Image (cartoon, rainbow, N blue to C red):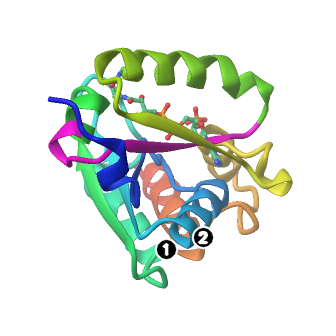
Amino acid sequence: MFIDLKETILEVIYPGSFDPLTNGHLDIIERAADKFERVIVSVLNNQKKTYLFSLQERIDMLKKSVSHLKNVEIDNFDGLLIDYVNEKKCCMIIRGLRAVSDFEYEMLMAIANKKLNPCVETLFLVSASEYSFLSSSLVKEISGFGGDVSSMVPKYVEKALNKKFREEKNGK
Ligand code: COA
């Protein structure tokens, strides 16, 4: 089933692992929310992948951090992104591009998704330059060694990281 782009262009899906959400992700969400009527931020739950934060923890982080954006909804999915996009009857995927190094991977995903459903477009937002170095792994590494990530993640995420690494240290 293909969806007519003209009918549903005002809704976009922003998929990702968000393990954890960073200010870079938040910047993309805020800019998308400013341009589209509705943004569905959807958390990937890949059963084969080990995450630092559970699906529920990643969802909670997003909900707390986007509560000021009334047109943003938090959801989750597993399996193929295109099946989820079809199920939602959406026709636009949004992704952030931080640097040229993101381009190849993102382009291949966009082409593959387009092969699976030619009506679905992928739209890229270029990351704000102050966040172009940021990644979830970097944040986890810095926080894991006790570094300050307060300028890199929302407050709620910073607290969650501190709690997670403190629990880990205490062997919980
Ligand atoms: N700011 C900060 N970091 C960003 C960012 C931004 N704007 N954009 C991407 N990143 C970073 C993330 O922090 C993450 O860093 P990490 O590798 O250090 O953890 C990395 O880029 C990628 O994370 P994310 O954007 O969350 O995407 P992902 O690669 O985990 O997932 C999906 C991408 C969900 C779109 C893709 O895996 C997918 O579609 N999966 C479903 C299966 C499927 O359909 N496969 C076929 C696809 S054609």
Label 2: how many residues lie within 10 Å, few (<14), some (14-19) or many (20+)?
Answer: many
Q: Residue at x 34, y 48 (%)?
A: 43
Nearest to the observer: residue 135 or residue 38: 38
Residue most toward the right?
129
* Disc 1 to disc 2: CB gap under 8 Å: yes
Where does label 2 land, which residue? 154
Q: Which residue range is magenta in the image?
A: 86-98
Task: Please state if 51 lies on the left or on the right of 166 as rendered.
Answer: left
Separation of residues labelled 1 and 2 (CA atoms): 7 Å
Residue 44: image quadrant is top left
Q: Residue at x 42, y 70 (%)?
A: 37
Q: Residue at x 22, y 28 (%)?
A: 79
Task: Please state if 151 lies on the left or on the right of 111 as rendered.
Answer: right
Q: What amino acid is labelled 2 in the image?
A: Pro
Task: Please state if 47 lies on the left or on the right of 171 as rendered.
Answer: left
Nearest to the observer: residue 170 or residue 69: 69
Classify the position of the N terminus by image quarter.
Answer: top left
Q: Is residue 133 magenta?
A: no
Residue 168 horizontal/vertical position (percent):
45, 49
Residue 147: image quadrant is bottom right
Q: Counting residues from the N terminus, which is met first, the one under dot 1 or under dot 2?
A: 1
Q: Is residue 88 magenta?
A: yes
Where does label 1 land, which residue? 65
* Viewer can see residue 172: no
Residue 134 horizontal/vertical position (percent):
73, 46
* Viewer can see residue 66: yes
Q: What amino acid is labelled 1 in the image?
A: Ser
Q: Residue at x 69, y 41 (%)?
A: 138
Secondary element at image label 2: loop
Label 1: how many residues lie within 10 Å, few (<14), some (14-19) or many (20+)?
Answer: some
Residue 57 horizontal/vertical position (percent):
33, 59
Secondary element at image label 1: helix
